[in-house]
Image (cartoon, rainbow, N blue to C red):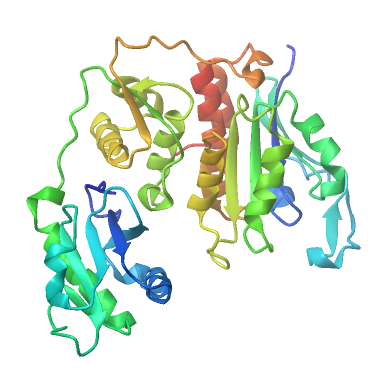
Amino acid sequence: MAMTQHKIVFSGPPGAGKTTAIAMLSDIPPVVTDVRNTDAGLGKELTTVGLDFGQADLGNGQCVRLFGTPGQLRFDFMWRIIATDALGLVILIDNTRPDPLDDFATYLDAYADLLPTINCAVGIGRTGECPLPTVDQFSSLLAERGLAFPVLPVDVRRREDVLMLIDTVLIQAEMRT
Amino acid sequence: MSGEAATGSHVKRDLRLRLRNLSDHDLAKVNAFLRIGRERLQCDWNVVFDGEFDVLMLGVEEPGAVLGMAGGSPLATLCVADAGTGRHDAVESLARPLQYEALLEALSALENRIASTPALSAVPRAFPPNARFRLLRWPSADLLQRDRDRQRLASFLLTRLVGLDELARLSHVDKPQCAEFLALLSTTGTLDVVAAAAVPEAPLASTAQANHPELDANHFATIRHGLGLTWR
């Protein structure tokens, strides 16, 4: 039986929780390409320079492959390559970064030609620590661009939060069939 | 009139507060007080400077002068005047300099008064028979309340027009709950409602979908089951 693979991509700035989100869903230890961080502004010891990979086995020869894009802007050429042909795209934002709306705009720009047709969800993390900008401001930024995607406050350490993002992506895919 | 954010007890009602004839200093204070006091208020107060509004806050020289200056047809008018220029003990007036507690007390009193008027009471929204619905933008976090059913229902409404029966069938959410959610959305201006015969809309194939022609309802069920998406 030929294996059916579905690709879901997690994207977002450094520290947004892409690696953690993949780990929440993966049946295998995630393959990460983290190196020691040399950017003091990121405030973390390790950062992803290639991509993260995980896999959830669905049985019957099917699996969901989970990819995380490198967060740093200098690797933006990889983002669209990884997202091409994906069943869904999840954009994660860290609300404690200096300008989360600007981060979000960066990703909207990077994926601009994919967004009108891709199944996408947006997760805003660490809203408890930083309630501003509000989740609604992210939705408004989407609306200004004529886009409408689920925008949900998330804690990627909670599996059910990550699953909720995936579910909203699957719902969009289901509605397009 | 602004929409109600909820017919139940979860979600705050939206009220539009139009500010007129207030100094920049007073504007900044009102905005700051509303932001800080948001949790204390029963309604979501949204400041507007034009268009329709529910409550008018008007800066005046004399509180008694407000009647002829208010304009529009607000549900209530709150006038702001310098201390010592008149009576400020009425709910409808506030003394300058504006104080946080006084503003919140006045708005709370107005909320109670407005809530008891038939104009803002919950009115079931009548949709055309066999109407179909689509969201124009993602609803506010206050409306969704981190409720998984609401988040899922909103997601079903993002991609294409959906009828009530189809929404209930696909989401596995009870039809009355779907209808209530649609009625709620319709008060926010984010829901496009189309009569059934108006536009036959074919499913919209995405680029991703075009690359996954094998996907059908069974595949989605398999993916959900495999990932442990079990709440519906």
> In the picture, residue B152 is in which quadrant?
top left
Residue A142 relative to residue B116: left or right:
right
**x%, y% of residue A78?**
84, 36
Residue B77 relative to residue B100: left or right:
left
Residue A160 visible somewhere in the drawing: no
How many marks are shown on the rendered structure? 0
**x%, y% of residue A177?**
53, 15
Residue at 19 percent across and 52 percent down: it is B72
Q: Is residue A141 above or below residue A15?
A: above
Q: In the depicted view, which residue is nearer to us: A89 or A167?
A: A89
Q: In the depicted view, which residue is nearer to us: B63 or B15?
A: B63
Q: In the depicted view, which residue is nearer to us: B105 or A159?
A: B105
Residue B107 visible somewhere in the drawing: yes
Give the quarter of the figure containing the C terminus of chain B. top left
> In the picture, residue B41 is in which quadrant?
bottom left
**x%, y% of residue A111?**
71, 34
Residue extending farthest to the bottom is: B84
Residue at 74 percent across and 49 percent down: it is A19
Residue at 46 percent across and 30 percent down: it is B158
**x%, y% of residue B117?**
9, 55
Residue at 50 percent across and 29 percent down: it is A171
Q: Is residue B199 above or below residue A147?
A: above
Residue A139 relative to residue A96: left or right:
left
Q: In the depicted view, which residue is nearer to us: A153 or B42?
A: B42
